[in-house]
Amino acid sequence: MQPQEIRALTVAEIETRLHSVEEEQFNLRFQLAIGQLENHNRLAQVRRDMARLRTELRTRQLAGESA
């Protein structure tokens, strides 16, 4: 997920995407633990997506507080 795509979303959409990405991370970690994970790079991608989403939420929160 690119930062430009995230900036185009509403706060509710970002929160929904964040929730789905967190669920995906849980499932990937579970697959890793039982040895069924095929794409180990996906864990890093999911972690970065979560960080991007949280960063955008925090940026909007701070922009709302300063306004």
Image (cartoon, helix red, strand yellow):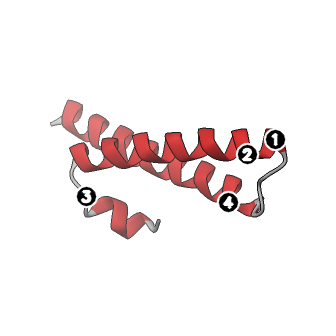
Secondary structure beneath dot 4 equals helix
Residue flagged by tag 2: what amino acid is it? Gln
* Disc nearer the start of the sequence (4/3): 3
Spatial CA distance of label 3 from label 1 is 35 Å
The mark that comes first in sequence, 3 or 2, is 3
Image point (63%, 59%), residue name: 45
Q: CA distance from mark 1 to mark 2?
A: 5 Å
Reply above or below: 19 against 65. below
Circle number at residue 31: 2
Mark 3 — residue?
9
- Identify residue for label 4: 42
The residue nearer to you, when weighing 58 against 18, is: 18
| Amino acid identity at mark 1 | Ile
Q: Quadrant of residue 44?
A: bottom right
Closer to the eye: label 3 or 1: 1
Q: Residue furthest right?
A: 35
Q: For the residue carrying disc 3, how many other residues have a C-alpha within 10 Å: few (<14), some (14-19), or many (20+)?
A: few
- The answer to which quarter of the image holds residue 62 is top left
**Horizontal side of residue 53 vs 33, given as left or right:** left
* Sequence-first disc among 2 and 4: 2
